[in-house]
Each structure stands twice: as structure tokens, then as C-alpha cells.
Image (spheres, grey):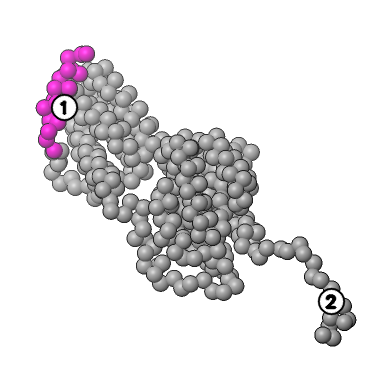
């Protein structure tokens, strides 16, 4: 290890127990930055570090490994947002760069523009430190939350919901953000369709909500669309399948008919608008296809309705068409217009009264007179 790198390590160890030194007049508007803001910050860090190497020639050589590590951290955060371990690594590399910038000889006179760039980097380190601490606190709250599945979201709405009307079968749409943002009353104005989607949820969280948000509402059927967030979180496919089975079993025990919807394809068509819209690395198309294949076979074996959104919503490149989504993940109005008739057909097939094959017996003249 070079002398500047040793010095940077020593400075980092000495300051490990202390909090961030807030620059005068710099107060971040919110500690927890959204993914788009983190990506923007990463882009700016790269620019400032490259500029630092021009202003301080010795820094370019000494900090080359740190700059490369920073770039790799930013790539990882773009592909897997809000990862605490990667965020901490990015913060560590940024502090190491600043330690090196303080230790290497600077040209005299040192330009005011270069000094402002270093000040901006220090401010960015403070912002990133605050973001990292807020990220850890948010994760701690999730782990210790008394309501990890967010049962409170629909508690009041469930209490106010009247029982199903006779002859008007109720269907609960159950899922994540794709269901949550779907304005069912606009697409199904004549049906008793109840939306119980919550953004960001996984199949395991639906299992926890099944009793309160589905069973207790006494629907004729439940339409389940879940799994894309499980794939993004690298949940094993076998675990997702197990959660599907538990959802189906709970519905069947309570005489609720089951409609399983396929996981939708995703796309990278909008990543130039926002780097977080690069979806296929988080949700590999092969994994989506494999999960849907299993789900279709499972529905066939158990007699459940399989609602295939995937086939009519995937293009020849294996992606969600750009005009059906504005972010590569969630359907837009045009996407929901593709989905709505498919859902209506699946619901009609599932809750329609059974067709009897027995023909009515003809009554003879003598029996009529009796």
C-alpha cells in the first residue's frame, strides 16, 4: 500500500467514531435521498474526482483505485438501489479520496475553483453520511415494525366496506404497486371490484394480509398479482412458489375462488430518462418466464384460473413495450387497457355459475294435468 493510502486509512480509523462535520450553511432538505438523487450524486462525484486529478496531479495517481471503487459502487447502487452495504462502501471511498486530497502536495497558488470542488465533495460526503444513517434507521424501523405487512393501510376501509350484494360477486384485486395504482372503478365500472394492492409488497407480505384484506371481505374470488418485488429482492423462486401455495390454500379453505395473474415483463426502454428505469438486471426476464411457467402449471394442477398478462404484454425482444409503461415496470393507462379485458374474461370464467349438462326432463300431458 502506498504512503497516501496508508495515511487515508489512518484518518478514516481516527474519525470512525465521530459524526459528520456539517459544513456551515449546508442543511440537506431530507436525509434519505431517493434513488434518482443518489444516481445524480454519483455522476457528480465522478466529475469532481476527475477534476481533482487535473488540479492536483499527484492526486490522480494516488487516488486511482479509490476513484475506480467509487465508480463500481455507483454502478451497484444504480442496479440495486438502497443497499446499505454498498452505500457505506461508497461513503468510505469518498472519505478516502478526501483524505488523499488533503495529504498530497498541491500546486501553489491553489486555484479557487479547485478549492470549491473539494468543498463540494466534502458537502457531498456529509449528505451521503446523513443518507446512510437514515437508510439504516429506516431498515431498523422495518425490522422492528409492529405492522410489517402494513395491515393498517386498509383497516378503516375494510371496516366501512358493506357486505357483497346478492347476485353481484365481489372480487378482490390483491398485489403490489401494479395493483395499487390501478383505478379499478374506471376500468370495471359495473363490478364489485375491491383494490387491496400495496406498493412494494412481496408474496410473503400478502400471506400476512390475506385474512384481513381478502378473507374478511367475503369475496367470490381473489385476483392475485405478485412476485416482481420478490425477484428484485432476490427471493428464492422456491420461496415465492411456497407463498403462492399458502395464498391459494387460505383462499380455498374459505371458499374463495383463485385467479393467479402472471408476473408482467419489464423493460429497459426508459433508462435514458432515469437510470433507475433499467429493470431487467433486477428482474431478469428468464426468472420472470420461469416463475410464470411454474405458476401456469400449478394453476392447471389445482384447477385455479391462470390470467396470462405476460404473453400479450411482451414484445419480440422479451421486454414490456415502451408504449405500455413509462418506467419499464408499471403499466401506464395504455398498459392497463390491455390488462382490463383479460382480467374481465378471467373473472367471468371464474365466478360464472356452473353450467349443468343435464337436460330438463320433458313433462308429458298426463303429468301436466296432475
Q: Position of residue 235 (x, y in %)?
A: 43, 38
Magenta stretch holds residue 157: no
Residue shown at the point (37%, 32%) measured from the top left? 76
Whether residue 115 is visible: yes
Q: Give the numbered dot on residue 334.
A: none
Between 196 and 85, which is closer to the camera in this rendering?
196
The residue pinned by badge 1 equals: 12
Tell me if 317 is positioned left or right of 83 in this view: right
Vertical position of residue 293 compared to residue 111: above or below = below
Tell me if 12 is positioned left or right of 363 in this view: left
Tell me if 19 is positioned left or right of 320 in this view: left
Where the N terminus falls, by quadrant?
top left
The residue pinned by badge 2 equals: 363
Magenta stretch holds residue 17: yes
Between 38 and 158, which is closer to the camera in this rendering?
158
* Residue that sits furthest to the right in the current view: 365
In front: mark 2 or mark 1?
2
Find numbered disc 2 in the image and state the secondary structure of the residue it sits on: loop
Q: Which comes sooner in the sequence, label 2 or label 1?
A: 1
What range is drawn magenta here? 1-19
- Marks 2 and 1, how far apart at CA: 96 Å
- Mark 2: few/some/many CA within 10 Å (<14, 14-19, 20+): few
Between 332 and 364, which is closer to the camera in this rendering?
364
Residue shown at the point (50%, 42%) measured from the top left? 241
Vertical position of residue 339 compared to residue 82: above or below = below
Between 213 and 340, which is closer to the camera in this rendering?
213
- Mark 1: few/some/many CA within 10 Å (<14, 14-19, 20+): some
Amino acid at each position: 500500500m502506498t504512503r497516501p493510502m496508508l495515511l487515508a486509512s489512518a484518518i478514516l480509523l481516527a474519525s470512525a467514531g465521530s459524526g459528520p462535520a456539517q459544513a456551515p450553511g449546508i442543511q440537506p432538505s431530507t436525509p434519505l435521498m431517493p434513488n434518482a438523487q443518489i444516481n445524480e450524486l454519483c455522476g457528480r462525484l465522478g466529475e469532481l474526482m476527475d477534476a481533482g486529478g487535473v488540479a492536483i496531479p499527484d492526486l490522480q495517481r494516488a487516488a486511482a483505485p479509490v476513484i475506480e471503487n467509487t465508480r463500481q459502487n455507483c454502478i451497484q447502487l444504480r442496479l440495486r438501489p438502497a443497499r446499505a452495504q454498498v452505500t457505506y462502501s461508497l461513503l468510505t471511498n469518498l472519505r478516502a479520496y478526501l483524505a488523499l486530497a488533503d495529504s498530497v502536495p498541491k500546486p501553489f497558488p491553489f486555484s479557487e475553483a479547485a478549492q470549491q470542488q473539494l468543498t463540494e465533495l466534502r458537502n457531498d460526503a456529509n449528505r451521503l453520511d446523513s443518507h446512510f444513517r437514515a437508510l439504516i434507521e429506516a431498515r431498523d424501523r422495518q425490522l422492528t415494525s409492529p405492522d410489517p405487512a402494513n395491515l393498517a393501510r386498509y383497516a378503516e376501509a375494510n371496516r366501512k366496506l358493506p357486505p357483497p350484494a346478492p347476485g353481484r360477486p365481489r372480487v378482490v384485486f390483491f398485489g403490489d404497486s401494479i395493483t395499487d395504482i390501478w383505478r379499478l372503478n374506471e376500468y370495471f365500472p359495473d363490478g364489485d371490484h375491491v383494490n387491496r394492492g400495496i406498493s412494494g409488497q412481496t408474496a410473503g407480505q400478502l400471506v400476512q394480509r390475506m385474512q384481513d384484506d381478502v378473507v374478511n371481505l367475503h369475496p367470490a374470488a381473489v385476483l392475485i398479482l405478485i412476485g416482481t418485488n420478490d425477484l428484485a429482492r432476490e427471493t428464492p423462486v422456491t420461496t415465492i412458489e411456497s407463498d403462492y401455495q399458502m395464498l391459494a390454500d387460505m383462499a380455498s379453505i374459505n371458499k374463495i375462488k383463485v385467479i393467479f395473474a402472471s408476473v408482467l415483463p419489464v423493460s429497459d426502454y426508459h433508462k435514458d430518462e432515469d437510470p433507475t428505469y433499467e429493470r431487467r438486471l433486477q428482474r431478469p426476464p428468464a426468472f420472470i418466464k420461469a416463475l410464470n411457467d411454474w405458476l401456469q402449471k400449478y394453476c392447471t394442477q389445482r384447477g385455479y384460473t391462470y390470467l396470462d398478462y405476460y404473453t400479450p404484454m411482451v414484445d419480440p425482444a422479451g421486454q414490456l413495450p415502451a408504449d405500455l409503461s413509462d418506467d419499464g415496470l408499471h403499466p401506464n393507462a395504455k398498459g392497463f387497457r390491455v390488462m382490463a379485458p383479460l382480467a374481465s374474461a378471467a373473472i367471468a370464467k371464474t365466478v360464472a355459475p356452473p353450467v349443468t349438462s343435464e337436460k330438463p326432463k320433458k313433462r308429458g300431458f298426463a303429468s301436466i294435468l296432475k
